[in-house]
Amino acid sequence: MIDNHSRHSKQPVGATHPLAHTNGRTPNDLRVVALAGGVGGAKLATGLQAVLSPGALSVIVNTGDDFEHWGLTICPDLDTVLYNLAGVNNPETGWGRADETFAVLRSMSLIGGEDWFRLGDADLAVHLRRSEWLRQGVSLTEVTDRLRRAFGVRSNILPMSDAPVRTLVHTDEGDLPFQHYFVGRRCEPCVIDISFVGAAEADLPDAAYTALLTADIIVFCPSNPYLSLDPILSVGEMRDLLSKLRAPKVAVAPIVGGKALKGPAAKIMREMGYPVTPVTIAAHFGDLLDGFVLDHEDEAAANHMGVPTLVTDTIMRDLESKARLAHAVLNFACSLTQPALPLSPHLHISDIAT
Ligand code: FO1
Protein backbone atom coordinates (compact mmCIF):
# COMPACT_ATOMS: atom_id res chain seq x y z
CA MET A 1 0.00 0.00 0.00
CA ILE A 2 1.29 3.45 -0.86
CA ASP A 3 1.45 5.96 1.94
CA ASN A 4 -0.49 8.95 0.63
CA HIS A 5 1.39 11.55 2.62
CA SER A 6 1.89 14.87 0.90
CA ARG A 7 5.40 15.26 -0.55
CA HIS A 8 5.75 18.36 1.59
CA SER A 9 4.34 17.00 4.86
CA LYS A 10 6.71 17.19 7.84
CA GLN A 11 5.15 14.05 9.36
CA PRO A 12 7.15 10.80 9.31
CA VAL A 13 6.32 9.00 6.09
CA GLY A 14 5.91 5.28 5.69
CA ALA A 15 4.14 5.21 9.06
CA THR A 16 1.09 3.45 7.65
CA HIS A 17 3.24 1.06 5.67
CA PRO A 18 4.31 -1.71 8.04
CA LEU A 19 7.76 -3.11 7.56
CA ALA A 20 7.88 -6.65 6.31
CA HIS A 21 9.78 -7.93 9.31
CA THR A 22 7.37 -10.49 10.62
CA ASN A 23 8.44 -14.07 11.15
CA GLY A 24 8.06 -16.29 8.16
CA ARG A 25 8.70 -13.61 5.59
CA THR A 26 11.60 -14.01 3.21
CA PRO A 27 13.55 -11.57 1.03
CA ASN A 28 11.01 -12.45 -1.66
CA ASP A 29 8.45 -10.34 0.18
CA LEU A 30 10.59 -7.25 0.59
CA ARG A 31 10.60 -4.09 -1.50
CA VAL A 32 14.06 -2.61 -1.54
CA VAL A 33 15.48 0.68 -2.78
CA ALA A 34 19.21 0.82 -3.48
CA LEU A 35 21.01 4.15 -3.91
CA ALA A 36 23.82 3.59 -6.37
CA GLY A 37 26.53 5.17 -8.46
CA GLY A 38 28.46 3.15 -11.01
CA VAL A 39 30.39 -0.09 -10.68
CA GLY A 40 30.26 -0.81 -6.89
CA GLY A 41 26.58 0.09 -6.72
CA ALA A 42 25.76 -1.95 -9.80
CA LYS A 43 27.44 -5.04 -8.30
CA LEU A 44 25.37 -4.96 -5.11
CA ALA A 45 22.25 -4.12 -7.14
CA THR A 46 22.91 -7.28 -9.16
CA GLY A 47 23.09 -9.29 -5.93
CA LEU A 48 19.90 -7.70 -4.63
CA GLN A 49 18.10 -8.43 -7.90
CA ALA A 50 19.19 -12.06 -7.62
CA VAL A 51 17.65 -12.58 -4.17
CA LEU A 52 14.50 -10.44 -4.49
CA SER A 53 11.26 -11.06 -6.34
CA PRO A 54 10.99 -9.65 -9.87
CA GLY A 55 10.19 -5.93 -9.66
CA ALA A 56 10.90 -5.71 -5.91
CA LEU A 57 14.18 -3.84 -6.38
CA SER A 58 14.34 -0.18 -7.38
CA VAL A 59 17.76 1.35 -7.93
CA ILE A 60 17.94 5.14 -7.64
CA VAL A 61 20.99 6.07 -9.67
CA ASN A 62 23.36 9.04 -9.64
CA THR A 63 23.06 11.25 -12.71
CA GLY A 64 25.66 13.82 -11.60
CA ASP A 65 28.21 12.06 -13.87
CA ASP A 66 26.03 12.66 -16.96
CA PHE A 67 27.38 14.90 -19.66
CA GLU A 68 27.00 15.96 -23.28
CA HIS A 69 29.47 14.33 -25.67
CA TRP A 70 29.40 13.99 -29.47
CA GLY A 71 26.10 15.91 -29.24
CA LEU A 72 24.57 13.11 -27.16
CA THR A 73 23.45 12.80 -23.55
CA ILE A 74 25.66 10.21 -21.83
CA CYS A 75 24.46 8.76 -18.51
CA PRO A 76 27.34 6.49 -17.40
CA ASP A 77 25.97 5.34 -14.04
CA LEU A 78 22.47 4.63 -15.36
CA ASP A 79 24.07 2.57 -18.14
CA THR A 80 26.43 0.77 -15.77
CA VAL A 81 23.47 -0.27 -13.61
CA LEU A 82 21.43 -1.20 -16.70
CA TYR A 83 24.20 -3.32 -18.24
CA ASN A 84 25.03 -5.05 -14.95
CA LEU A 85 21.39 -5.88 -14.18
CA ALA A 86 20.99 -7.14 -17.76
CA GLY A 87 24.20 -9.18 -17.46
CA VAL A 88 25.75 -7.53 -20.54
CA ASN A 89 28.40 -5.41 -18.81
CA ASN A 90 32.11 -5.60 -19.46
CA PRO A 91 33.31 -7.79 -16.56
CA GLU A 92 36.82 -6.28 -16.57
CA THR A 93 35.95 -2.58 -16.35
CA GLY A 94 32.51 -2.95 -14.77
CA TRP A 95 31.23 -0.21 -17.13
CA GLY A 96 30.46 -0.43 -20.84
CA ARG A 97 29.37 -3.55 -22.73
CA ALA A 98 30.90 -7.01 -22.90
CA ASP A 99 32.45 -7.92 -26.26
CA GLU A 100 32.40 -4.27 -27.30
CA THR A 101 33.97 -2.87 -30.49
CA PHE A 102 35.25 0.68 -31.03
CA ALA A 103 35.03 1.29 -34.79
CA VAL A 104 33.11 4.58 -34.37
CA LEU A 105 35.61 5.83 -31.78
CA ARG A 106 38.49 5.10 -34.16
CA SER A 107 36.75 6.87 -37.05
CA MET A 108 35.90 9.80 -34.81
CA SER A 109 39.52 10.07 -33.76
CA LEU A 110 40.66 10.01 -37.43
CA ILE A 111 38.44 12.96 -38.31
CA GLY A 112 39.61 14.97 -35.28
CA GLY A 113 36.69 14.26 -32.95
CA GLU A 114 37.07 13.85 -29.20
CA ASP A 115 38.38 10.39 -28.34
CA TRP A 116 39.29 10.68 -24.64
CA PHE A 117 36.01 9.11 -23.52
CA ARG A 118 35.79 5.58 -24.87
CA LEU A 119 32.30 5.09 -26.25
CA GLY A 120 31.87 1.62 -27.72
CA ASP A 121 29.76 0.84 -30.77
CA ALA A 122 27.00 -1.12 -29.01
CA ASP A 123 26.99 1.36 -26.14
CA LEU A 124 26.63 4.18 -28.67
CA ALA A 125 23.26 2.83 -29.79
CA VAL A 126 21.95 3.41 -26.26
CA HIS A 127 23.21 7.01 -26.22
CA LEU A 128 21.68 7.68 -29.66
CA ARG A 129 18.31 6.21 -28.66
CA ARG A 130 18.26 8.01 -25.30
CA SER A 131 19.22 11.34 -26.84
CA GLU A 132 16.57 10.94 -29.55
CA TRP A 133 13.85 10.33 -26.93
CA LEU A 134 15.08 13.19 -24.72
CA ARG A 135 14.95 15.55 -27.73
CA GLN A 136 11.34 14.46 -28.26
CA GLY A 137 10.58 15.60 -24.70
CA VAL A 138 10.44 12.17 -23.02
CA SER A 139 11.61 12.36 -19.38
CA LEU A 140 14.86 10.65 -18.37
CA THR A 141 12.83 8.41 -16.02
CA GLU A 142 10.67 7.20 -18.92
CA VAL A 143 13.65 6.89 -21.28
CA THR A 144 15.47 4.77 -18.70
CA ASP A 145 12.42 2.57 -18.22
CA ARG A 146 12.12 2.03 -21.98
CA LEU A 147 15.78 0.98 -22.08
CA ARG A 148 15.28 -1.29 -19.05
CA ARG A 149 12.42 -3.05 -20.79
CA ALA A 150 14.37 -3.33 -24.03
CA PHE A 151 17.19 -5.07 -22.12
CA GLY A 152 14.72 -7.34 -20.25
CA VAL A 153 15.74 -6.07 -16.80
CA ARG A 154 13.14 -6.85 -14.15
CA SER A 155 14.27 -4.30 -11.55
CA ASN A 156 13.35 -0.62 -11.70
CA ILE A 157 16.18 1.71 -12.69
CA LEU A 158 15.36 5.25 -11.61
CA PRO A 159 17.39 8.40 -12.29
CA MET A 160 17.76 10.61 -9.22
CA SER A 161 16.52 13.56 -11.29
CA ASP A 162 14.87 14.23 -14.64
CA ALA A 163 16.43 17.69 -14.79
CA PRO A 164 20.17 17.87 -15.47
CA VAL A 165 22.39 17.78 -12.37
CA ARG A 166 26.11 18.04 -13.01
CA THR A 167 28.88 17.19 -10.58
CA LEU A 168 31.61 19.82 -10.54
CA VAL A 169 34.93 18.90 -8.96
CA HIS A 170 36.80 21.84 -7.43
CA THR A 171 40.50 20.98 -7.67
CA ASP A 172 43.92 22.56 -7.26
CA GLU A 173 43.86 22.89 -11.07
CA GLY A 174 40.50 24.68 -11.10
CA ASP A 175 36.91 23.48 -11.49
CA LEU A 176 36.48 20.37 -13.62
CA PRO A 177 33.23 18.82 -14.90
CA PHE A 178 33.06 15.29 -13.49
CA GLN A 179 34.06 13.23 -16.55
CA HIS A 180 36.90 15.65 -17.34
CA TYR A 181 38.21 15.06 -13.81
CA PHE A 182 37.49 11.31 -13.74
CA VAL A 183 38.36 10.12 -17.23
CA GLY A 184 40.07 13.12 -18.86
CA ARG A 185 42.45 13.78 -15.95
CA ARG A 186 42.33 10.24 -14.45
CA CYS A 187 41.40 11.71 -11.02
CA GLU A 188 44.93 13.19 -10.73
CA PRO A 189 44.11 16.77 -9.61
CA CYS A 190 43.80 17.27 -5.85
CA VAL A 191 40.14 17.61 -4.81
CA ILE A 192 39.28 20.62 -2.66
CA ASP A 193 35.49 20.39 -2.77
CA ILE A 194 32.66 18.92 -4.86
CA SER A 195 29.37 20.53 -5.85
CA PHE A 196 26.27 19.33 -7.66
CA VAL A 197 25.07 22.01 -10.03
CA GLY A 198 21.27 21.98 -10.35
CA ALA A 199 20.69 19.49 -7.52
CA ALA A 200 19.05 21.85 -5.03
CA GLU A 201 16.53 23.04 -7.65
CA ALA A 202 15.87 19.53 -8.98
CA ASP A 203 12.90 17.44 -7.87
CA LEU A 204 13.03 13.78 -7.07
CA PRO A 205 11.02 12.19 -9.91
CA ASP A 206 7.68 10.69 -8.87
CA ALA A 207 8.84 7.14 -9.64
CA ALA A 208 11.85 7.47 -7.30
CA TYR A 209 9.71 9.17 -4.65
CA THR A 210 7.09 6.41 -4.71
CA ALA A 211 9.75 3.69 -4.61
CA LEU A 212 11.23 5.26 -1.47
CA LEU A 213 7.86 5.70 0.16
CA THR A 214 6.93 2.05 -0.33
CA ALA A 215 10.37 0.59 0.45
CA ASP A 216 10.83 -1.85 3.32
CA ILE A 217 14.61 -1.37 3.26
CA ILE A 218 16.89 1.30 1.81
CA VAL A 219 20.45 0.31 0.95
CA PHE A 220 23.30 2.78 0.42
CA CYS A 221 25.41 0.76 -2.01
CA PRO A 222 29.23 0.64 -1.74
CA SER A 223 29.52 3.54 -4.17
CA ASN A 224 31.77 6.56 -3.72
CA PRO A 225 30.06 8.54 -0.91
CA TYR A 226 31.31 11.92 -2.15
CA LEU A 227 31.01 11.51 -5.92
CA SER A 228 28.16 9.03 -6.31
CA LEU A 229 25.88 9.04 -3.25
CA ASP A 230 26.14 12.71 -2.23
CA PRO A 231 24.68 13.87 -5.58
CA ILE A 232 21.64 11.65 -4.93
CA LEU A 233 21.29 13.00 -1.39
CA SER A 234 21.58 16.57 -2.72
CA VAL A 235 18.55 16.36 -4.98
CA GLY A 236 15.75 18.65 -3.73
CA GLU A 237 13.95 17.08 -0.81
CA MET A 238 15.87 13.78 -0.79
CA ARG A 239 17.68 14.13 2.53
CA ASP A 240 14.56 15.39 4.26
CA LEU A 241 12.51 12.53 2.82
CA LEU A 242 15.06 9.88 3.81
CA SER A 243 15.23 11.21 7.35
CA LYS A 244 11.45 10.80 7.70
CA LEU A 245 11.16 7.30 6.26
CA ARG A 246 10.71 4.48 8.73
CA ALA A 247 12.35 1.86 6.53
CA PRO A 248 15.78 0.89 7.90
CA LYS A 249 18.62 2.54 5.99
CA VAL A 250 21.80 0.53 5.79
CA ALA A 251 25.11 1.47 4.13
CA VAL A 252 27.70 -0.96 2.79
CA ALA A 253 31.31 0.22 3.17
CA PRO A 254 33.01 1.24 -0.08
CA ILE A 255 36.34 1.36 1.82
CA VAL A 256 38.00 -1.90 2.87
CA GLY A 257 41.34 -1.98 4.67
CA GLY A 258 42.05 1.69 3.95
CA LYS A 259 41.47 1.29 0.20
CA ALA A 260 38.52 2.05 -2.04
CA LEU A 261 36.95 -1.02 -3.63
CA LYS A 262 37.12 0.90 -6.91
CA GLY A 263 37.83 4.47 -7.96
CA PRO A 264 39.19 7.51 -6.17
CA ALA A 265 37.22 7.47 -2.87
CA ALA A 266 40.31 6.88 -0.69
CA LYS A 267 42.39 9.45 -2.61
CA ILE A 268 39.65 12.07 -2.26
CA MET A 269 39.27 11.35 1.46
CA ARG A 270 42.99 11.91 1.97
CA GLU A 271 42.91 15.10 -0.09
CA MET A 272 39.98 16.45 1.91
CA GLY A 273 41.77 15.59 5.15
CA TYR A 274 39.56 12.70 6.30
CA PRO A 275 40.85 9.43 7.81
CA VAL A 276 40.36 6.68 5.21
CA THR A 277 38.16 4.40 7.27
CA PRO A 278 34.48 3.37 7.20
CA VAL A 279 34.04 5.38 10.43
CA THR A 280 34.49 8.57 8.37
CA ILE A 281 31.81 7.39 5.95
CA ALA A 282 29.32 6.48 8.69
CA ALA A 283 29.88 9.94 10.21
CA HIS A 284 29.46 11.51 6.77
CA PHE A 285 25.97 10.02 6.36
CA GLY A 286 25.24 10.65 10.06
CA ASP A 287 21.63 10.36 11.20
CA LEU A 288 20.46 9.09 7.83
CA LEU A 289 21.78 5.62 8.65
CA ASP A 290 20.32 2.93 10.91
CA GLY A 291 23.03 0.37 10.23
CA PHE A 292 26.39 -0.18 8.56
CA VAL A 293 27.95 -3.19 6.89
CA LEU A 294 31.71 -3.58 7.28
CA ASP A 295 34.18 -5.98 5.79
CA HIS A 296 35.95 -8.50 8.09
CA GLU A 297 39.15 -6.62 7.41
CA ASP A 298 37.74 -3.57 9.25
CA GLU A 299 36.24 -5.52 12.15
CA ALA A 300 38.17 -3.35 14.65
CA ALA A 301 36.06 -0.34 13.56
CA ALA A 302 32.77 -2.09 14.36
CA ASN A 303 32.38 -0.49 17.79
CA HIS A 304 33.09 3.00 16.47
CA MET A 305 30.50 3.24 13.72
CA GLY A 306 27.82 4.96 15.84
CA VAL A 307 25.13 2.61 14.47
CA PRO A 308 24.54 -1.16 14.67
CA THR A 309 27.12 -2.83 12.47
CA LEU A 310 27.32 -6.09 10.57
CA VAL A 311 30.76 -7.51 9.85
CA THR A 312 30.84 -9.78 6.83
CA ASP A 313 32.67 -10.47 3.57
CA THR A 314 31.85 -7.45 1.36
CA ILE A 315 34.06 -8.29 -1.62
CA MET A 316 31.88 -9.10 -4.65
CA ARG A 317 33.75 -11.26 -7.14
CA ASP A 318 30.93 -13.15 -8.86
CA LEU A 319 27.14 -13.53 -8.81
CA GLU A 320 27.25 -15.84 -5.82
CA SER A 321 29.23 -13.39 -3.66
CA LYS A 322 27.03 -10.48 -4.81
CA ALA A 323 23.90 -12.43 -3.84
CA ARG A 324 25.44 -13.59 -0.57
CA LEU A 325 26.26 -10.00 0.44
CA ALA A 326 22.81 -8.82 -0.67
CA HIS A 327 21.21 -11.52 1.44
CA ALA A 328 23.33 -10.61 4.48
CA VAL A 329 22.50 -6.89 4.07
CA LEU A 330 18.75 -7.58 3.86
CA ASN A 331 18.80 -9.91 6.84
CA PHE A 332 20.77 -7.35 8.84
CA ALA A 333 18.38 -4.53 7.86
CA CYS A 334 15.42 -6.66 8.94
CA SER A 335 17.08 -7.39 12.28
CA LEU A 336 17.31 -3.67 13.06
CA THR A 337 13.61 -3.42 13.79
CA GLN A 338 12.39 -7.02 14.19
CA PRO A 339 13.85 -10.46 14.86
CA ALA A 340 16.00 -11.63 11.96
CA LEU A 341 14.33 -13.37 9.07
CA PRO A 342 14.27 -17.15 9.44
CA LEU A 343 16.70 -17.69 6.62
CA SER A 344 19.56 -20.00 5.99
CA PRO A 345 22.81 -18.11 6.64
CA HIS A 346 24.31 -19.66 3.54
CA LEU A 347 22.81 -19.01 0.18
CA HIS A 348 23.62 -21.42 -2.59
CA ILE A 349 23.89 -20.41 -6.20
CA SER A 350 21.03 -22.81 -7.00
CA ASP A 351 18.76 -20.67 -4.76
CA ILE A 352 19.51 -17.53 -6.69
CA ALA A 353 16.98 -16.29 -9.21
CA THR A 354 18.70 -15.12 -12.37
N1 FO1 B 1 35.59 5.31 -17.60
C1 FO1 B 1 36.89 5.47 -17.92
O1 FO1 B 1 37.73 5.44 -17.02
N2 FO1 B 1 37.28 5.70 -19.24
C2 FO1 B 1 36.40 5.73 -20.26
O2 FO1 B 1 36.78 5.94 -21.39
C3 FO1 B 1 35.02 5.51 -19.93
C4 FO1 B 1 34.05 5.45 -20.92
C5 FO1 B 1 32.72 5.15 -20.55
C6 FO1 B 1 31.75 5.03 -21.54
C7 FO1 B 1 30.44 4.75 -21.21
C8 FO1 B 1 30.10 4.58 -19.87
O3 FO1 B 1 28.83 4.31 -19.55
C9 FO1 B 1 31.05 4.69 -18.88
C10 FO1 B 1 32.36 4.98 -19.21
N3 FO1 B 1 33.34 5.09 -18.23
C11 FO1 B 1 34.65 5.31 -18.57
C12 FO1 B 1 33.01 4.97 -16.82
C13 FO1 B 1 32.51 6.26 -16.19
O4 FO1 B 1 33.18 7.39 -16.58
C14 FO1 B 1 32.62 6.14 -14.67
O5 FO1 B 1 32.65 4.83 -14.26
C15 FO1 B 1 31.47 6.68 -13.95
O6 FO1 B 1 30.98 7.88 -14.39
C16 FO1 B 1 31.82 6.76 -12.46
O7 FO1 B 1 30.85 6.05 -11.79
Image (spheres, rainbow, N blue to C red):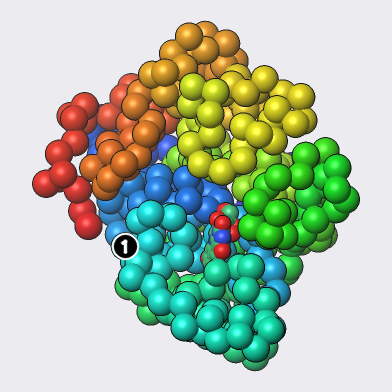
**Is 73 displayed left or right of 152 in the figure?**
right
In the image as oriented, which residue stretches furthest toward the front?
Answer: 110
Residue 56 appears in view: no
Nearest the viewer among 119 and 53 is: 119
Among the 4 quarters of the image, the one containing residue 216 = top left
Q: In the picture, which quadrant includes the C terminus? A: bottom left
Nearest the viewer among 342 and 104 is: 104
Q: Position of residue 199 (x, y in %)?
A: 77, 56
The answer to whether 75 is drawn above or below residue 347 in the figure is: below
Q: Position of residue 329 (x, y in %)?
A: 38, 33
The answer to whether 150 is drawn above or below residue 168 in the figure is: below
Q: Position of residue 136 (x, y in %)?
A: 65, 91
**Is 242 displayed left or right of 314 in the figure?**
right
**Is 37 displayed left or right of 65 in the figure?**
left
Q: Position of residue 11 (x, y in %)?
A: 69, 40
For the point 26% across and 47% down, the residue is 319
**Is 84 displayed left or right of 271 in the figure?**
left
What amino acid type is highlighted by mark number 1? Gly
| Label 1 crowd (10 A; few <14 / some 14-19 / many >=20) | some
For the point 62% across and 27% down, the residue is 281
For the point 18% across and 30% down, the residue is 346
Q: What residue is pinned by disc 1?
A: 87
Nearest the viewer among 50 and 54 is: 50
